[in-house]
Amino acid sequence: MTKLLEIENLKTQFFTSAGTVMAVDDVSYDVEEGETVAVVGESGCGKSVCALSVLRLIPWPPGKIVDGRIRFMGRNLLELSDDEIRKIRGHHISMVFQEPMTSLNPVLTIGLQLSETMQHHLGMSEAQAAERAAELLQMVGISEPHRRLRQYPHHLSGGMRQRVMIALALACEPKLIIADEPTTALDVTIQAQILELMKDLTRRLGVALIVITHNLGVVARYADRVNVMYAGKIIEMGDAQQIYHNPQHPYTLGLLASVPRMDQARGARLVPIEGQPPDLTRLDAGCAFRPRCRFAIDRCAAEFPPLEAVEDGHLSACWRADELAELRNAS
Amino acid sequence: MSARPAEALPSSTAAVQKGETLLEVRNLRKHFPVTEGIIFQRAVAFVKAVDGVSFTINKGETLGLVGESGCGKTTVGRCILQLEQATEGEIIFEGQDLTKLDQKALVPVREKIQVIFQDPYSSLNPRMKIGNIIEEPIRVHGIIPEVRARRERVAELLSVCGLSPRFADRYPHEMSGGQRQRVGIARALSLNPDFIICDEAVSALDVSIQAQVINLLEDLREEFHLTYLFIAHDLSVVRHLCHRVAVMYLGKMVELAESDELFESPLHPYTQALLNAVPIPDPKIEATREHRIISGEVPSPINPPSGCVFHPRCPLAVERCQQDVPEFRELRPGHWVACTEV
């Protein structure tokens, strides 16, 4: 498979009155054509900022991409002019956001919002775009597409709006879709419908997908590869099997132990990660997870562990990654 | 669903049967009017938020109440708290029907029933210090008249909930979501309640923090012999915390059973669909699991479908489901289901 997107040493910071927030700190990862990559982590770990950085959607002030390269189809997105990046957004790379109510324009019809993109990027005529818009709605499972095209977002339910967002994301046949918590606001049966739809369409059309989520179940069901983020850094990276069945970082380990599971009977006590996530304005040179880590040693305070391979295709940023299995058994 | 005698109500089986009934809800209905007209408002329709729900909760038990948005689970909780006036039905708490009590007679009951809300941001007054937030119910109910003793009680409550007593002098905005939720729990505990309604109490929290709060709720249940009604949409959390689980759909209860029984052998097609839709955090299991996704969306509670409310989405639906309202019947001991086709 060929690499579609390569993010190298990305650093995005927010300059606020409280100090500089290191939202994304030296993040590198690749996405291959047609694959689904999940970025997991808790609120404030930088997973959304990292995705927004790819499309240069970080508002300045206060945010700024201070360093790194983002290669996409042979070009560095960070070096493009505003006009050039606009030709990529919504065309080659599109986004699906969490809240479909706020990401659709409430005063424009569904049809107009869909055809606008296609007229702009693909140079379609109004009639062509309207026809294709109806096809797209059909494809995402919306009945009576021609009637829906004349409706406004408030006429639709949350699940329907998210289907429209997906139609919008697919409109210009992108190579990559970035979905930021695409189903968090939806009920569980609707969440399943939307995720199955996204999986089916991305597989069928060969679109690569970056899913940003905090839901470890969603990741297990849909992702090929997983990046776990903590405090602005990727701390573990691997395929889904490796991450879930052989976690090599204490944070991933802690995360998996703290999720209640529907297939486990009552009574098994959860093992939470004690403490709070760190303040991203006050990070030191050491490992940011150290204060909450059961296995921290002196070295963890002195320098940040590099993201290194522990097995084929599986990387972990922990000084004690190779001893972790023994440490776990001992405790 | 019609009203039925008390002995036929869904009560619990072996595991919790030794406990006595703390709360009994009989045939509860709550219809909200949809009004038209500006000055002379008249009801043109009713949102049937809760439409004939009956269940009991035993002392020391945690009953989970699950369902998707708009199924009426929160309204059930608000009716029990007497924050909503029930349209019909009885809510019997320790032998008294709460729907028949006036505000004054409710005061001692309110000491015993407390609530923890979902959003730790909007449920704490941003202008009050944490200490005052927790102290207020103790002062209002005149439990501890003396100021110093009250402060000590606040410090004790904070430490019970895993917070340093120093937090008493802080404001809500100085705390994280998890810490605020602990404050909400401390406030609910301040009056030594018997019964706490947790309305999506851990839904807004991140996983690692959520696990801390779940463990805290379990510890407090043991320590203070609490009874919980745990309203939630996250089925994994419900499985973990609850002894028995009730599933609601469009204002009706569709299934009620012991937690393990419900999750291992769900009977109602809606419960089956709901459980099937929840992804399990294990790629090996997910790879082999069969995914049967139910189509369609939840219909409007203003004009719910005739007969069984689930029939338009139901894979088992037959013709009579369109006319006959299924009876909520005990199919196995302690396992209640509102479906004629199982």
Image (cartoon, coloured by chain):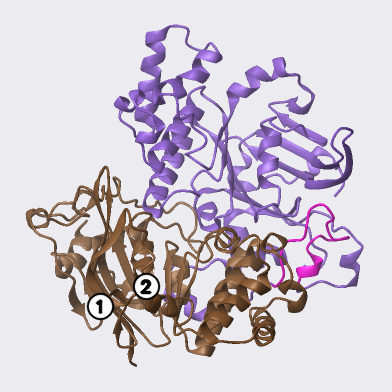
Chain colours: A brown, B purple
| Subunit ID for the residue under disc 1 | A
Residue B267 placement: quadrant? bottom right
Q: Residue A37 in the image: state x and y as whole percent.
A: 39, 76
Asked if one can make out residue A117 in the rendered structure from this viewpoint, the answer is yes
SS category of the residue bearing label 2: helix
- Give the labeled residue for mark 1: A314
Residue A61 vs residue B73: left or right? left
- Give the labeled residue for mark 2: A82
Q: Which residues are magenta?
A: B295-314
Which one is nearer the viewer's eye here, B266 or B109?
A: B109
Give above or below for A96 relative to A126. above
Name the residue at 63% across, 18% down.
B108
Residue B162 placement: quadrant? top left
Give above or below for A28 relative to B274. below
Choose mark 1 or mark 2, whichever is in front. Answer: 2
Name the residue at 91% across, 68% down.
B320
Residue B183 vs residue A201: left or right? left
Q: Dot 2, how many residues are within 10 Å of its Cα: few (below 14), some (14-19), or many (20+)?
A: few
Q: Residue B240 in the image: state x and y as whole percent.
A: 49, 53
SS category of the residue bearing label 1: strand
- Inspect the magenta stretch and tell me whether residue A206 lies in it: no
Question: For the residue marked with disc 2, what is the amino acid?
Answer: Asp
Which one is nearer the viewer's eye here, A23 or A65?
A: A65
Q: Main secondary structure of the magenta part?
A: loop
Whether pointer 1 and pointer 2 mark residues with C-beta atoms closer than 8 Å, the reply is no
